[in-house]
Amino acid sequence: VLAAIPENIGDLTALRELFLYSSGLTGEIPQSLGDLAALVTLALNNNALEGALPDSFDGLVSLQVLDLARNRLEKLTKNIGKLPALEELYLNSNQFQGQLPKEIGGLTNLRRLYAENNLFSGDAPDFSRMLELEELGLAYNKVAGDDKFPGFEGDLPNLGGLRKLAVLRLHESE
């Protein structure tokens, strides 16, 4: 049984898929994971990982699917917006706090974004450039200040240009 993700995981530079979901992992995600430039799928969901998402994640230039759901992660790196191939991002059911990084709005290939059941507050990113977005889930977040946009302060962002958007989940904020 693997207790934590080993620091030398970054030595596996040919790795294309890494599935460690429901593995009982604890601790932080190592910086060396960002060395896996060939990685297409990273599934770390349903563990007890904590802390921050490493800044080194901008090295995951081939990554298409990132599943971090159901952990204890608290902080996203702004480098999350530097993943040009990312199509699916699952951040739901963590302990992420503060503002959802505005850099997420630059993920122009993203089709699915789920950031539900966290403690996000503040203004939502500008989603207007995310023309491939089909599913957006931001429900069950912390409301701070103005309650015009559930889970976030301020008005609902302009979603009118998102012609492919088929699922929009903004309900049930505290």
Image (tube, rainbow, N blue to C red):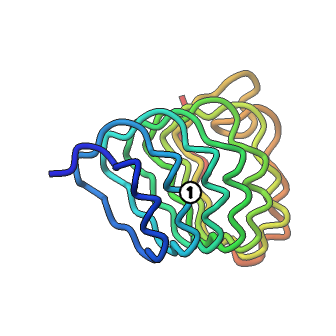
| Vertical relation: 76 (above or below) 21 | above
Q: Residue drawn at (40%, 62%), measured in percent from left and top?
A: 43
| Residue 166 at least partly seen | no
In this rendered view, identify the residue nearer to me: 155 or 125.
Answer: 125
| Vertical relation: 145 (above or below) 34 | above
On screen, residue 172 versus residue 154, left or right, reads left
Q: Residue drawn at (64%, 61%), measured in percent from left and top?
A: 59
| Residue 101 at least partly seen | yes
Check the image and name the residue furthest to the top.
145
In this rendered view, identify the residue nearer to me: 147 or 22.
Answer: 22
State the quadrant of the C terminus.
Answer: top right
Image location (x, y in percent) of residue 117? 48, 41
Image location (x, y in percent) of residue 55? 64, 45
Q: Quadrant of residue 158?
A: bottom right
Check the image and name the residue furthest to the left.
1
Number of numbered tags placed on the structure image: 1
- Tell me if mark 1 has few (under 14), some (14-19) or many (20+) residues whose alpha carbon lies within 10 angstroms of its own: many
On screen, residue 48 versus residue 67, left or right, reads left
Q: Residue drawn at (59%, 60%), measured in percent from left and top?
A: 113
Q: Amino acid at mark 1?
A: Gly
On screen, residue 150 versus residue 106, left or right, reads left
Q: Quadrant of residue 76?
A: top right
Residue that carries the numbered disc 1 in the rendered image = 34
In this rendered view, identify the residue nearer to me: 112 or 154.
Answer: 112
On screen, residue 150 versus residue 28, left or right, reads right
Q: Residue drawn at (67%, 69%), measured in percent from left and top?
A: 110
Image location (x, y in percent) of residue 93? 43, 43
Image location (x, y in percent) of residue 150? 65, 39
Q: Secondary structure at mark 1?
A: helix
